[in-house]
Amino acid sequence: MATVEKSDAPARELAPPPARAGHLLRVLGVVFGMAVTVGITIGMGILRTPGDVAARLPTPWLFMGAWLLGGVYALLGAVSVAELGTMIPRSGGFYVFARRALGEYPGFIVGWSDWLSTCGTVAAVALVLGEYAGRLFPALAGRGAAVACAVTLAFAVLQWRGVRWGSRSQELTSLLKTVAFVALIVACFALGGGEARSAAHASVPAAAANPSRSFLNALVLALQGIIYTYDGWYSTVYFGEEVRDTARNVPRAMVGSVLLVIAIYLLFNLALVYVLPFERLAGEPLAAGAAAEAVFGPSGATVIGVVAILSLLASVNGNTLTAPRVVYAMSRDRLFWRGASRVNRGGTPTVSLFMSTAAALLMIIYSGTFGGLLAAIAFFFVFDYTLVFLSVFVLRFREPDAERPYRAWGYPLTTALALAGSVAFLYGAVDADRENSVFALKLLGASLPVFLVLRLWRRAHESRER
């Protein structure tokens, strides 16, 4: 599928400077890379999105085809970004690539938006987890914010001990999540299907029956939801310098995890179509819950609650791992406060972890006032996609002789398709939700004065050191 060479030695200028108390540890492997991707990607999206997608597309074949198309987009992104991950094997994610290809300020914008959206994701996922915990355990009802804060703090404390603790917890929670989804899929095919087989499938979802809505518009809107559900396919590159044998393990982890997610999503959606009449699936706000009730009866709510909590635990842990790496990388490059580059002996960037956890906790506490930020997260994701795919082209043109242990399969066509898709979805996000898109652009604009102040401070500090 791709050409992979043995060497993964980074260029001399990319070697990380020593941290004050420790340094990032190169102890992670393919299993962790797949675990963090699966853990972050498979979350509440797959439990909620299928009903909305089915409402926009008129037949099960179009429904399943759209999920496959979304998976192909994620796979194109993975094979393209894996090239950058092996060419620039540094922890920090999209920020690292955008800074190298596009310059300091574009890199700062990507880092700023990526960090905000990741902290916001931790808060949002933890809040949903708190809601499900309240449904399963009556004693926790009405205490969703407290549960969310407790879970966020617990994972932060666990990761404070070191990257080995964080990686093992990610591997465990992702394994439990995968087992839960596989068990639910098997149960749907083994025990369900009667209601769907006995129902007439001639009905057309209301959205598809509306003559004012074109099929193309419906498909684009459906794909937007699907693409957001696949978000997280790039997670391995946030740990670039912590992965052993980067040239081999980063592409394997990225491509392998995306293929696994595609398989789970297709089988899960096929199970939903098998269990539920398509007209009932269309518009169902929690399609997985409806399927669980059809299979398990009154116990279905408990079953889907357990699956949701296992999914959300892995997502909280994975995003708590990735957010500090963004701040750490920016700090190390002197685009942020240098103190945030401190790393403990366990390989954890502790100051960055503290800052990221504090930001997530504030968002949880003030959850009623950061709804606009959550709505802007989707815009940030696609915006960052656009810049990172553009970075592949820029670096291929500007640095043609740079060492690339892995080269994107099918370049330039595959990367061009991924870039075109991200531009199309960015346009769609602005067109569908202009108010929150404008809010997102304002947040990005707010990065400029912060960047200028930090640059002045850095120059003053460097002149004092001379």
Image (tube, grey):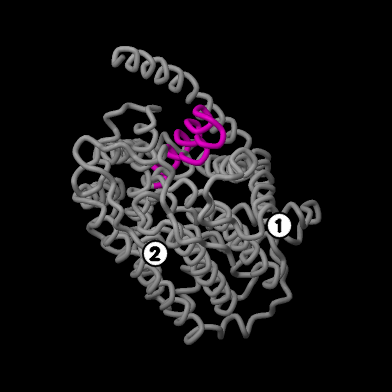
Binning the other alpha carbons within 10 Å of mark 2 as few (below 14), some (14 to 19) or many (20 upward) gives many
**Hey, what amino acid is under mark 2?**
Val
Magenta stretch: dominant secondary structure: helix
Q: Nearer the viewer, mark 1 or mark 2?
A: 2
Binning the other alpha carbons within 10 Å of mark 1 as few (below 14), some (14 to 19) or many (20 upward) gives some
Identify which residue, 248 or 429, lies in the foreground.
248
Give the distance between the C-alpha atoms of the residues marked 1 and 2, in whole angstroms.
35 Å
Identify which residue, 363 or 252, lies in the foreground.
252
At which x and y percent is residue 264?
A: 50, 71
Location of the N terminus by quadrant is bottom right
**Hey, what amino acid is under mark 1?**
Leu
Residue visible at 66% across and 59% down in the picture: 410
Residue tagged 1: 219
CB within 8 Å, label 1 to label 2: no
Can residue 123 be seen here? yes
User: Does 105 appear in magenta?
Assistant: yes
Residue visible at 32% across and 16% down in the picture: 461
Mark 1 or mark 2: name the one nearer the start of the chain.
Answer: 2
Q: Which mark is residue 457?
A: none
Q: Is residue 139 left or right of residue 171?
A: left
